[in-house]
Amino acid sequence: MAGTFVRRTFAVPEGEEWLFRVDAETQLKAYCHWQREVGEEKGEKRGEMPPGSQTRPALQEVRRDLPVIVVVHGLEGSSDSNYMWGIADKAWARGFHAVRMNQRNCGGTERLTPTLYNSGLSGDYRAVLLELICEGFEQIYFAGYSMGGNLVSKMAGEWGAAPPKELRGVCAVCPSMDLSACADALEETENFLYQRHFVKGLMARYRRKAELFPQRYSKDGFGPVRTVREFDDKITAPYFGYRDAEDYYQHAGAKRVIGDVSMPMLVITAKDDPFVPYEALVRAGVDNNPCVRFVAPEHGGHCGFISRWQGAERFWAEERIVEFVEARSKEARK
């Protein structure tokens, strides 16, 4: 909880608002921190676009050769979550680009899509990746926390043995790959506060969607919703064509495809995570794929990982993500 509520300051400049097109009716809002050409570097080949591409004006002087870290938040988070800013801050300090995504409907973006969001929408980040490739970026990395970790893991696995060469790596922190196990864990007594927080946020978001799109969503008729599983059973599953919550969980969880990941991947979880069970990740075979580096310290909670050290090491998982990208980038330049 401290990772969420502790006050933090960041040196990274404000990001530029950006809309990624997913399909005819859905856009995702992001805030992009671009490293731009300066001084004599302007106009060099590395800042130019590939022949025939249609760059946005805002990207005219952006370095295409530098790594891009696309960060995806967890359930009921947004681009303003502390860890989103933390990774962007660390990436910027190392000279990388950072893109802080909002999932569908998050960060005040309900009007950008008539749909809800769910843990299986990995195609959203496939679309983001392909747009960045189209814009000429050469090294693209994704990092996701919790629900976002499941989404980027699922995307990585779905590429199978032939991911785009520009997708150089993926990081997932406390990824909810086994959604059913996570829903069960949330129903434990000690997780009452988490459960209440998530359900309250999900229902408030649903009510906003029902007001904006009354032709699609009923304001009532599904009875009381007290748990995340009940929300998914009564709302998520039927609106996305699943039989029930369990059917949704089995199709949306990255555990089905983690064995197919063929690019370098870093997975960080904590053995004391209260509702992403360490044992569920082990059962999913995360540590059986040679492309995946699985790091599981004894402590860290759910996406917290606050260390005893000051400076960049204080928020330990954020630093590991940026280190991973830095190491992969150095390898790519050899």
Image: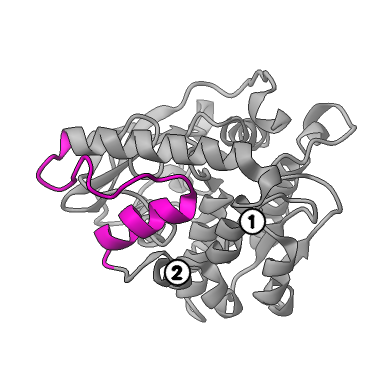
Q: Is residue 127 left or right of residue 256?
A: left
Residue 176 in picture, x, y percent from top left: 58, 58
Residue 191 found in image quarter: top right
Q: Is residue 167 left or right of residue 51?
A: right
Q: Is residue 333 above or below residue 12?
A: below
| Stretch of the chain drawn in magenta | 212-241
- Residue shown at 72% from the left, 56% from the top: 268
Which is nearer the eye, 70 or 65?
A: 70
Residue found at the far left of this picture: 215
Which is nearer the eye, 155 or 273?
A: 273
Q: Is residue 37 above or below residue 45?
A: above
Q: Is residue 121 left or right of residue 313?
A: left
Residue 210 found in image quarter: top left
Q: Amino acid at mark 2?
A: Glu
The residue where tag 1 is placed is: 185
Q: Is residue 229 magenta?
A: yes
Q: SS class of the residue under badge 2?
A: helix
The N terminus lies in which quarter of the figure? Answer: top right
